[in-house]
C-alpha cells in the first residue's frame, strides 16, 4: 500500500488518537502558533513524528486544497475493507446491525457528510460500490470530521450482490425513493436488523439496487422543492431510524 495526504484538525486528531501507527509525518502552517497547534506539536513529539513547517502556498499545493486548516499529515494507506470484512463485522456484533448503503454517491463532500451523520446515528458500517463512487479521499475525510477514522467504510465489487448477502443474514433493506408514494418514512418500522439504502445525487437508486430493497419509502415533502441533497436525506433517514431504535 502507498501513502496519502490527509488534512483538517478533526481528521488528524482522530488519526493520532485511533491509528497513530499510520501517521508518518506532520505538516503545519508556519503562522499557526495557537494552543491547538501547540497541542498537536506536543502529541507529535510524544509519538516521535517529524513535523515540517510550511508556507501557505506550499500547504495548498501539498493538500491540493485550500481547506486544510493549516495542518496535514502523510499517512500509510490501509487495505480497503470489502465484502469479507463486512461479513466479519456482522459476525462480531451482538446487536441488530444498523447499516447505511450508498448507491453510487460520487461527490466526496456528500460522502463525508453521510459518514459524519452515520457515525452520529450509531451506524455500524457504511457500504458503497468500489467503482463509479466516491472513496475516502482527503476531502471526504475532512468533511467527515473524524468519522472516517472510526466508522468502517466498506467498498464492495457488486452492491446488488452484497444486498442479497445481507438479506440472507436477515437484514431488512429500506430504500429511499421519491416516487415511493405509498411508503412514508415515518410509517416504516426501522427497528431490528436494518440497512438504509440511498441513491446517487440526481439519479437515485439504480434498478438492481431498487429491486433488492425489501421496501421503498420517501421523505414527505411539503414545500416546492421535490428532493433533498443525498447527505441531508441520509441525515433525516438515519435519525428517524435512531429515534425508533432508541424508543
Image (spheres, rainbow, N blue to C red):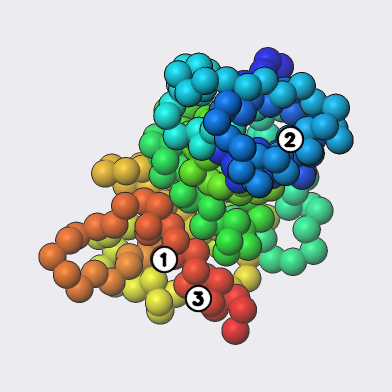
Circle 2 sits on which residue? 41
Residue 152 shown left or right of residue 186 in the figure: right
Residue 164 shown left or right of residue 92 in the figure: left
Q: In which quarter of the image is the C terminus?
A: bottom right
Residue 187 shown left or right of residue 159 in the figure: left
Give the label, 1 or 2, closer to the camera: 2
Q: Which of 161 and 241 is in front in this view?
A: 241
Going from N to C along the chain, the mark reached first, 3 or 1, is 3
Q: Residue at x 32, y 67 (%)?
A: 219
Q: Quadrant of the N terminus?
A: top right
Q: Is mark 1 on a helix, strand or loop?
A: helix
Provide residue 91's location: percent of width, then percent of height: 79, 52
Circle 1 sits on which residue? 236
Tell me, yes or no, whether the two marked residues, 1 and 2, touch with CB atoms within 8 Å.
no
Answer few, some or many: residues within 10 Å of disc 2's Cα (few below 14, many 20 plus, some between 14 and 19): some
- CA–CA distance in space, label 1 to label 2: 38 Å
Q: Which residue is drawn at 45% across and 18% down?
A: 57
- CA–CA distance in space, label 3 to label 1: 15 Å
Provide residue 77's location: percent of width, then percent of height: 69, 24
Provide residue 64's location: percent of width, then percent of height: 45, 21
Q: Quadrant of residue 72?
A: top right
- Asked if one can make out residue 163 in the rendered structure from this viewpoint, the answer is no
Circle 3 sits on which residue? 189
Q: Which residue is drawn at 75% across and 39% down?
A: 16
Amino acid at each position: 500500500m502507498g501513502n496519502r495526504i490527509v488534512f483538517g484538525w478533526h481528521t488528524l486528531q482522530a488519526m493520532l488518537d485511533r491509528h497513530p501507527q499510520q501517521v508518518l509525518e506532520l505538516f503545519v502552517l508556519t503562522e499557526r502558533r495557537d494552543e491547538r497547534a501547540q497541542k498537536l506539536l506536543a502529541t507529535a513529539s510524544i509519538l516521535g513524528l517529524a513535523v515540517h513547517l510550511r508556507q501557505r502556498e506550499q500547504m495548498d499545493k501539498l493538500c491540493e486544497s485550500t481547506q486544510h486548516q493549516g495542518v496535514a499529515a502523510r499517512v500509510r494507506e490501509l487495505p480497503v475493507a470489502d465484502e469479507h470484512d463486512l461479513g466479519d463485522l456482522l459476525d462480531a456484533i451482538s446487536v441488530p446491525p444498523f447499516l447505511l448503503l450508498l448507491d453510487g454517491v460520487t461527490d466526496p463532500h456528500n460522502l463525508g457528510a453521510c459518514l459524519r451523520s452515520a457515525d452520529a446515528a450509531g451506524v455500524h458500517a457504511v457500504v458503497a460500490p468500489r467503482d463509479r463512487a466516491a472513496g475516502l479521499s482527503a476531502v471526504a475525510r475532512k468533511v467527515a470530521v473524524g468519522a472516517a477514522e472510526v466508522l468502517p467504510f466498506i467498498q464492495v465489487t457488486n452492491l446488488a450482490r452484497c444486498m442479497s448477502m445481507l438479506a440472507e443474514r436477515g437484514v431488512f433493506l429500506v430504500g429511499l425513493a421519491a416516487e415511493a408514494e405509498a411508503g412514508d418514512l415515518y410509517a416504516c418500522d426501522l427497528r431490528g436488523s436494518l440497512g438504509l439504502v440511498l441513491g446517487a445525487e440526481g439519479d437515485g437508486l439504480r434498478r438492481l439496487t431498487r429491486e433488492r430493497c425489501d421496501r421503498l419509502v420517501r421523505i414527505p415533502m411539503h414545500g416546492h422543492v421535490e428532493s433533498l441533497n443525498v447527505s441531508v436525506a441520509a441525515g433525516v433517514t438515519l435519525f428517524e431510524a435512531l429515534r425508533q431504535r432508541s424508543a
